[in-house]
Image (cartoon, rainbow, N blue to C red):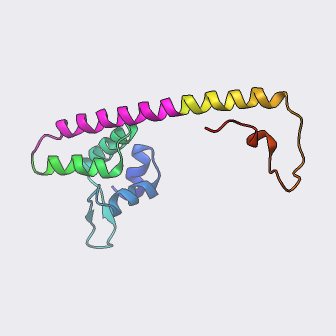
Amino acid sequence: MTVTQLAKQVGISSEIVRHYTRIGLLKPTRNAQNGYRIFSAEDMKRLKFILRAKGLGFTLSEIGQILEHTKIHDSPCPLVRDLIARRIKENREKLDAMACLQIRMEKALAQWKEMPDGIPDGHSVCHLIEAMDDL
């Protein structure tokens, strides 16, 4: 299969297939006659794995690490569990931070509804923001 054929069968752009090939996640053979990359059914299976892993939030670098484990016949499962546990913790921290930001924004908007518009006078940029308590 060519880049275009593989991309079409999996439902992604050819550029994504080319990118994964450039960074070594896919390793197609070359057609000796025209130099085109030729992808096998095994490459398609690997590409589907990459897309599933990306769908779970793994980075391309992490996916490369996972694939390296399989290359040396070592189970990547402990690494996968560790990576996803770390990502869950990071995501929870980000969600908590976003929830705090949302509350600050809502409080600011409520406070600003009662305030008149101001015109910069050389001492102030926007009195709405400047009137907020330190965060």
Please count the marks in the image.
Answer: 0
Question: Residue 17: horizontal and vertical position, in percent?
Answer: 39, 55
**Which one is nearer the viewer's eye here, 104 or 14?**
104
Above or below — where is 26 with respect to 87?
A: below
Would you say 93 lies left or right of 45 here?
right
Would you say 100 lies left or right of 81 here?
right
Residue 83: in magenta span:
yes
Question: Residue 44: horizontal and vertical position, in percent?
Answer: 30, 47
Above or below — where is 44 with respect to 87?
A: below
Above or below — where is 59 with respect to 34?
A: above
Query: Residue 54 falls in which quadrant of the image?
Result: top left
The residue positioned 33% from the left and 55% from the top of the image is: 1
Query: Residue 101 falls in which quadrant of the image?
Result: top right
The stretch in magenta equals 74-97
Majority secondary structure of the magenta segment?
helix
**Which one is nearer the viewer's eye here, 51 or 38?**
51
Residue 24: in magenta span:
no
**Which quadrant is the C terminus positioned in?**
top right
Above or below — where is 3 with respect to 58?
A: below
Question: Residue 131: horizontal and vertical position, in percent?
Answer: 76, 38
Would you say 111 lies left or right of 78 here?
right
Would you say 39 lies left or right of 109 here?
left
**Which one is nearer the viewer's eye here, 93 or 104?**
104
The residue positioned 45% from the left and 47% from the top of the image is: 12
**Which one is nearer the viewer's eye here, 23 or 38?**
23
Q: Find the residue positioned furthest to the left.
A: 73
Question: Residue 63: horizontal and vertical position, in percent?
Answer: 29, 47
The residue positioned 13% from the left and 40% from the top of the image is: 75
The residue positioned 47% from the left and 35% from the top of the image is: 94
